[in-house]
């Protein structure tokens, strides 16, 4: 962790995971500067500036060029990509989940931001796992391709691959996927609040998390132990 406070931009700040990450960044003023919310309409900018009291930029990843995105991110030390099209429109899956992430990589590289955390999806690499999941095939094709692009970069990336997201209370505990019984796909669930906590810890521990793809599900290991056990 650098000596100065880290300025973190969140692409997808208005989302459910994005908002939880922002809360946690705001709470930890020892390590983090006021974060920057990257959002896609003026009401969201006003909300983050006036109510959440953080910086905000109206930069739709769908409609902005990589250069415009780079201008918005300039001066940040780390970027979190947690945007998602959240639907079945193939066009939006292409422009948000896939190209939005690719443009984020290009933007980070062009302004010298090394640290990028991307929220992907559980077992994105395993086509056999998702090919027949109703309604998720196109999404997973995009996520897998986006992950590949991130890995090709020279960035200190962390690709976080959470299981099925829930919006309950945080558990504070995770479990490596290999510790689940085979065919236990349904149990790859995780609270969004635990994903957010993991991301904050990943920012604080690049030595354990940079240039890695890390699958996440709730389990029985406290998050700090889970991070310290990462190889
Ligand atoms: N649901 C699951 O079980 C699951 C599992 C694994 C991974 N994931 C991934 O986890 C991530 C976070 O999930 P979540 O629950 O927080 O999703 P979410 O609540 O739908 O948040 C996604 C955010 O992306 C924003 N966004 C969409 N298009 C954008 C654009 N053109 N420019 C800027 N922002 C844009 C949305 O903006 P608006 O607020 O304006 O709509 C929304 O705030 C997503 O990448 C998702 O694919 C989900």
Image (tube, rainbow, N blue to C red):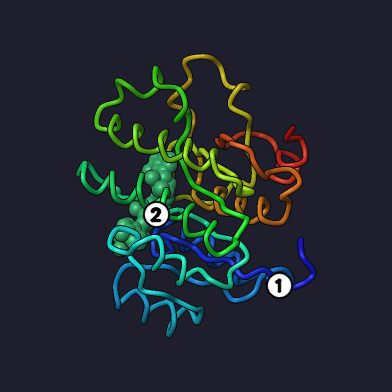
Q: Is mark 2 within 8 Å of ligand 1?
A: yes
Q: What is the x, y in percent for residue 101?
A: 42, 49
Gap in angstroms between the C-alphas marked 1 and 2: 24 Å
Residue tagged 1: 5
State left or right for residue 108 relative to residue 221. left
Pointer 2 residue = 83
Q: Name the spot of residue 58 as percent of width and height, x first.
A: 36, 73
Element class at badge 2: loop
Left or right side of 65 for 188: right
Q: In which image quadrant can residue 11 be found?
A: bottom left
How busy is the neighbourhood of tag 1: few (under 14 within 10 Å), some, or many (20 plus)? some
Residue at the outermost top position:
182
Residue at x 29% of width, y 72% of height: 41
- Image point 73% across, 35% down: which residue? 230
Mark number, residue 62: none
Identified at 52% across, 14% down, the residue is 182
Residue at screen point 67% across, 45% down: 210
144 left or right of 195 in image: left
């Amino acid at each position: 962790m650098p000596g100065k406070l880290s300025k973190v931009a969140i692409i997808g700040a208005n989302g459910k995971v994005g908002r939880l990450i922002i809360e946690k960044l705001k709470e930890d003023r020892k390590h983090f500067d006021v974060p920057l919310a990257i959002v896609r309409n003026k009401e969201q900018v006003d909300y983050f500036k006036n109510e959440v009291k953080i910086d905000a930029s109206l930069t739709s990843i769908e409609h902005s060029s990589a250069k415009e995105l780079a201008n918005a991110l300039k001066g940040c030390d780390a970027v979190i990509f947690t945007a998602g099209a959240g639907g079945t429109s193939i066009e939006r899956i292409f422009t948000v989940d896939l190209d939005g992430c690719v443009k984020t990589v290009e933007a980070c590289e062009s302004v010298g931001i090394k640290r990028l955390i991307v929220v992907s999806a559980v077992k994105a690499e395993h086509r056999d796992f998702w090919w027949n999941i109703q309604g998720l095939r196109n999404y997973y094709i995009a996520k897998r391709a986006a992950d590949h692009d991130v890995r090709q970069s020279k960035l200190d990336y962390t690709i976080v691959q959470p299981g099925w997201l829930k919006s309950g209370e945080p558990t504070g505990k995770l479990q490596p996927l290999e510790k689940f019984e085979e065919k236990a796909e349904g149990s790859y669930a995780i609270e969004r609040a635990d994903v957010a906590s993991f991301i904050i810890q990943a920012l604080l521990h690049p030595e354990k998390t940079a240039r890695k793809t890390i699958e996440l599900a709730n389990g029985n290991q406290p998050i700090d132990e889970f991070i310290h056990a990462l190889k």
